[in-house]
């Protein structure tokens, strides 16, 4: 019986999923599948922490998707897990492994108060974490997703823009992304950190959600307390073009969802059969700065302006479920096709 299971799951990953190097590795819990997330350490020159959740159905021979979730500034990964509920089976319908890294001093590269990228590079940290996870656990390489809130959304954008990292992720989601214009975030040639966006593959399918009354990262990018940010419309326009849609192109689909409280727009682009939703946007009427969910957040409602009647996590997981990394990108930064 055990041999049969083994054979079947081996067959499963040979035919359907691109199994990561960690498939077949014996499991040394914690975390236990379906149990509480475990706080683990990763040594990348400095010791970094992350929370890791394994789904109930985890099996060392069956590749499963991976979601890496970046908290907002001032948060812990534990709080972010509780707010987003990415580890709740009812919302994690992909049965994904979920990793919640912890930013140093509760922030990430991309925040004006975080050290320059030369000194602390959270894109490089994300790369090390990904490599560690795929070498240790059985992950479907074509189903790796990233998501982030606020400053964590800014980092998600930087990862999606990165020439190498963009070739390792299938899709990304951002809630109230903090995409700063701050000149102190300078990189080479006078460009600021967020001016540089050169994904190594396109499209990088993205979903962004933003409250119309966000008091921290204003929708129009102005009067934002921590300094100007890129207005959401401008940010959408950038990704529209990068992801292969027409400049200034109208959305393919536009309408109200979640009982009219959300105006959703989505752009479907690409050639013929490859046509897909490459960019989606939620304009959340009257919503502030926080994670959209039906869950109360205790004392933290001041900026969020209360719960909504739906769970962003569910929509994000659904979006992820419709995306997978094209096969030729399973070798990081390299088209397999070019090697043949
Ligand atoms: C939202 O998440 C909660 C778990 O906190 C769950 O009970 C509820 O059914 C979910 N609602 C929807 C519409 O997904």
Image (tube, rainbow, N blue to C red):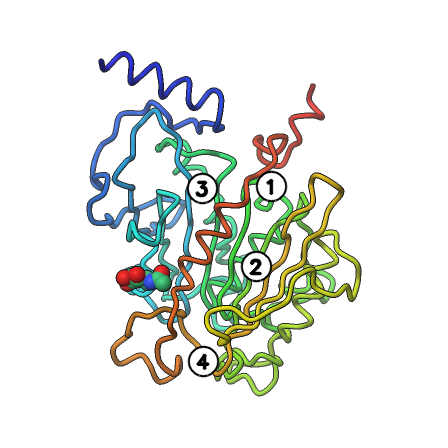
Determine contact: label 4, label 2, CB under 8 Å. no
The reply to whether discs 3 and 2 touch (Cβ–Cβ < 8 Å) is no
Residue 32, quarter of picture: top left
Residue 118 position by quadrant = bottom right
Q: Secondary structure at mark 4?
A: loop
Q: What percent of the width, then of the height, locates residue 329?
A: 61, 34
Q: How crowded is the residue under tag 1: few (<14 C-alpha within 10 Å), some, or many (20+)?
A: many
The residue that appears at 69% across and 25% down in the rendered structure is 337
Residue 77 visible somewhere in the drawing: no
Q: Do tag 1 and tag 3 residues touch (Cβ < 8 Å)?
A: no
Q: Which residue is mark 2?
A: 157
Question: Distance of mark 4 from mark 2, alpha carbons?
Answer: 20 Å
How far separated are the C-alphas under marks 3 and 2?
16 Å
Q: Earlier in the sequence, mark 3 or mark 2?
A: 3
* Residue found at x 49% / y 28%: 18
Q: CA distance from mark 2 to mark 1?
A: 14 Å
Whether 216 is drawn above or below 148: the answer is: below
Q: Earlier in the sequence, mark 2 or mark 1?
A: 2
* Within-10-Å neighbours for mark 2: few <14, some 14–19, many 20+: many
């Amino acid at each position: 019986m055990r041999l049969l299971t083994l054979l079947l799951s081996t067959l499963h990953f040979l035919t359907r999923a691109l199994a990561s190097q960690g498939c077949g590795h014996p499991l040394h819990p914690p975390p236990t599948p379906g149990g509480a997330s475990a706080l683990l350490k990763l040594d990348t020159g400095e010791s970094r922490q992350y929370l890791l959740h394994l789904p109930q159905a985890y099996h060392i021979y069956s590749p499963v998707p991976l979601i890496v979730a970046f908290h907002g500034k001032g948060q812990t990964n534990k709080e972010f897990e509780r707010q987003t509920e990415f580890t709740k089976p009812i919302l994690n319908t992909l049965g994904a492994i979920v990793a919640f890294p912890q930013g140093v001093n509760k922030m990430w590269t991309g925040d004006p108060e975080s050290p320059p990228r030369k000194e602390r590079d959270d894109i490089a940290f994300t790369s090390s974490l990904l490599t560690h996870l795929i070498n240790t656990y059985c992950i479907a390489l074509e189903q790796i997703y990233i998501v982030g809130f606020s400053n964590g959304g800014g980092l998600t954008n930087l990862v999606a823009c990165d020439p190498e990292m963009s070739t390792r992720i299938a899709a990304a989601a951002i809630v109230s992304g903090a995409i700063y214009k701050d000149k102190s975030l300078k990189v080479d040639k006078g460009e600021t950190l967020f001016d540089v966006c050169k994904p190594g593959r396109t499209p990088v399918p993205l979903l962004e959600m933003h409250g119309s009354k966000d008091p921290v990262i204003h929708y129009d990018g102005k009067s934002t307390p921590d300094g100007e940010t890129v207005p959401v419309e401008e940010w959408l326009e950038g990704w529209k073009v990068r992801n292969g849609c027409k400049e200034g192109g109208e959305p393919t689909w536009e309408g109200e969802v979640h009982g009219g409280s959300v105006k959703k727009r989505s752009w479907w682009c690409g050639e013929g059969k490859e046509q897909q939703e490459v960019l989606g946007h939620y304009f959340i009427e009257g919503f502030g700065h926080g994670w959209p969910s039906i869950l109360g957040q205790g004392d933290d409602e001041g900026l969020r302006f209360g719960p909504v009647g739906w769970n962003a996590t569910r929509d994000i997981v659904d979006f992820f479920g419709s995306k997978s990394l094209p096969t030729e990108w399973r070798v990081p930064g390299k088209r397999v096709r070019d090697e043949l």
